[in-house]
Image (cartoon, rainbow, N blue to C red):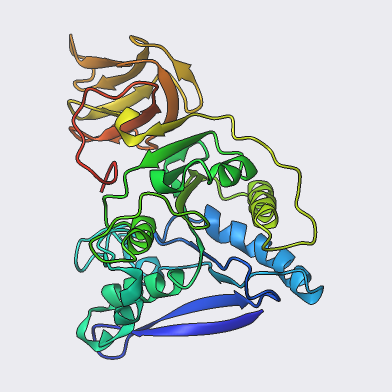
């Protein structure tokens, strides 16, 4: 394993950020190349600990000559966000300087322009330098996994329709409970990677991308940083890499993905019409029917009519819910994966900021 650091100069004198990069050299130049990163949202750590255990196994495989394709791993992809705390709370999702989501505003370029990402980097602030470095590394691979987590959540993934159903092997290996099929219309990291491949010929969109994969994996919730889960997920990711012929000498027996795979338009986001204390009646992983009571919002404690009840707009699987128990007006409470499109309007791109 080769360990190097990318140094990103800060935007004020005397500061800089260091980005560790772990590389495993494959023995077969024709094998797929893999790029995996975690903690782009700096407080989302299940992927970081997964990669800690995966690298143990990769080092052993490397010593045995059992790595076919090059593997690049960035276990802590956002040192800038990891250093941002406000009144003792880590603020790793939005850059405090620009107020931009660290997983948005990645450059949308064609793969033929990859080299331009790291040209004239002194012209960019530190957050943009970081994004350009990460995207440049990812575009040198064939398979790209961006490891995140939600708040309270099942294991699921955002996968561009251009990679589905070929990516069902990843969903099965990681025992995902759902897949959300995205439209590839945002500037998030995994969609910027897909954009570059789709527009290999600028102006001409390729609808399918065989042999490629760019995906956001949601490894349950923020509090699911656990050695048993991390080792199990590392084993699952190993099975995926083995099935794709990247590690190991034998491919494991194929397993089928049995969960729902639904377009983003089929995701109901339950939002509170008023602020207040949250009482959940249903939990993640439960299947609910239209009209089921989901949440009570206590808006005026102790007063007549001081609460609001929210019910399910249609049948579905509760995918996520917030860990907050005091919410603001229009705050997100739940995501529900459904068989039918939501009646709520949705802009193209991601579900949330």
Quarter holding residue 314: top left
How many numbered marks have been drawn onto this rendered protein structure? 0
Residue 322 sits above or below residue 132 on the image: above
Residue 158 sits above or below residue 330 on the image: below
State the image coordinates of residue 328 (x, y, percent, origin top left).
21, 35
Q: Residue furthest bottom?
A: 14
Left or right of residue 26, residue 278 in this image: left
Q: Which of 341 and 130 is in front in this view?
A: 341
Residue 90 appears in the figure: no
Q: In which quarter of the image is the N terminus?
A: bottom right
Left or right of residue 339, residue 46 in this image: right
Residue 42 appears in the figure: yes
State the image coordinates of residue 291 (x, y, percent, origin top left).
33, 9
At x 48% / y 67%, what residue is drawn?
Answer: 76
At x 29% / y 65%, what residue is drawn?
Answer: 106
Residue 233 sits above or below residue 176 on the image: below
State the image coordinates of residue 272 (x, y, percent, origin top left).
23, 27
At x 33% / y 28%, what residue is drawn?
Answer: 266
Q: Nearer the viewer, residue 18 or 267?
A: 267
State the image coordinates of residue 186 (x, y, percent, origin top left).
27, 52
């Amino acid at each position: 394993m080769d360990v190097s650091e990318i140094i990103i100069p800060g935007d004020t004198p005397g500061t800089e950020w260091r980005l560790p990069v772990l590389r495993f050299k494959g023995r077969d130049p024709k094998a797929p190349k893999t790029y995996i990163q975690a903690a782009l949202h700096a407080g989302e750590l299940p992927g970081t600990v997964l990669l800690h255990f995966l690298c143990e196994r990769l080092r052993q495989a490397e010593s045995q000559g059992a790595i076919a394709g090059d593997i690049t791993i960035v276990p802590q992809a956002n040192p800038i966000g990891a250093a941002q705390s406000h009144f003792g709370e880590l603020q790793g999702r939005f850059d405090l300087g620009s107020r931009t989501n660290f997983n948005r505003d990645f450059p949308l370029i064609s793969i033929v322009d990859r080299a331009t990402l790291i040209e004239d980097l002194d012209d960019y602030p530190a957050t943009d330098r970081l994004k350009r470095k990460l995207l440049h590394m990812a575009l040198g691979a064939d398979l790209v996994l961006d490891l995140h987590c939600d708040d309270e959540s099942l294991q699921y993934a955002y996968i561009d329709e251009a990679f589905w159903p070929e990516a069902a092997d990843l969903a099965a290996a990681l025992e995902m409970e759902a897949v959300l099929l995205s439209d590839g219309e945002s500037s998030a990291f995994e969609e910027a990677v897909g954009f570059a491949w789709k527009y290999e010929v600028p102006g001409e969109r390729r609808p399918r991308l065989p042999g490629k994969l760019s995906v956001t994996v949601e490894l349950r919730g923020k509090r699911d940083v656990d050695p048993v889960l991390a080792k199990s997920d590392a084993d699952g990711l190993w099975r995926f890499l083995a099935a794709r012929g990247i590690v190991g000498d034998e491919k494991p027996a194929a397993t089928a993905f049995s969960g729902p795979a639904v377009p983003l338009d089929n995701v109901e986001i339950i939002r509170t019409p008023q602020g207040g204390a949250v009482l959940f009646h249903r939990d993640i992983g439960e299947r609910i029917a239209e009209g089921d009571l989901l949440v009570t919002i206590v808006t005026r404690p102790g007063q007549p009519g001081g609460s609001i009840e929210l019910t399910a707009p249609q049948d579905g699987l509760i995918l996520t819910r917030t860990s907050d128990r005091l919410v603001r007006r229009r705050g997100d409470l739940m995501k529900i994966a459904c068989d039918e499109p939501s009646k709520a309007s949705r802009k193209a791109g991601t579900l949330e900021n």
